[in-house]
Image (spheres, rainbow, N blue to C red):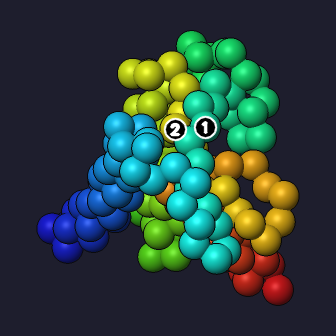
Amino acid sequence: MINKMQTKLYFLSLSIFIVLIDQFTKYLMFYNTKLFINKDFVLFKLDLVKNYGAAFNIFSGSRIFLSLISIFFSILIIYFIFRKNTLNAFDLYSYSFILGGTIGNGIDRVYKGFVVDFINLNIINFPVFNIADISINIGFIFLLYNIFKNNR
């Protein structure tokens, strides 16, 4: 029982680590804009965008709705991590990455009213994003991979 709890705490710690990295990078960009803005790094450049919506700016201006969605899904994922005993390690990594990203963007929505985005790809025309967005996408890719792997 202790080993299972330690494992689940490890995955929760991974989510917290992702939140800390996300919030630190957003803090750096938001409060040091002049230092970092328009810095070019071959594949991407740093810009500052205040995103008042969700992915691709959908539901723009729906702060309360998006904040509630973030809180709801964060609680749901924490429940899955701690209460579902049928999850394998791959599922737990998936949920941990999604949870870290959801909490990271949720903190911005609740406290600032917008999400700080700052990574702008040079190689394709794509919306500006942040570490939390990357984490959520990694989690979804892991989930999709696991679904397809198990349905063979």
Residue 100 visible from this viewpoint: no
Contact flag, marks 1 and 2 (Cβ < 8 Å): yes
Residue found at the far left of this picture? 2
Residue toward you, 79 or 40 = 40
Which residue is at the front of the view, 24 or 144?
24
Rendered residue at 78%/77% (across/down): 148
- In this rendering, is residue 22 above or below 113? below
Helix, strand or loop under label 2: strand
Q: Which mark is drawn over residue 71? A: none
Give the residue at x 35% y 37%: 31
Residue located beneath label 1 in the image: 49
The residue at the point 39 percent across, 21 percent down is 111
Instruction: Give the numbered dot on residue 116.
Output: 2
Indicate left or right for 141 with 30 as reference. Answer: right
Q: What secondary structure is marked by label 1?
A: strand
**Up/down of 55 relative to 68, above or below:** below
| Residue in front for this viewpoint, 58 or 142 | 58
Q: Position of residue 22 (x, y in %)?
A: 40, 52
| Label 1 environment density (alpha carbons within 10 Å; few <14, some 14–19, many ≥20) | some
**Which of 109/78 is in front?**
109
Three-letter code for the amino acid on which mark 2 is drawn? Val
Q: Residue at x 52, y 76 (%)?
A: 90
Position of residue 88 measured from the top left corner of the image (x, y, whole percent): 49, 74
Q: Quadrant of the N terminus?
A: bottom left
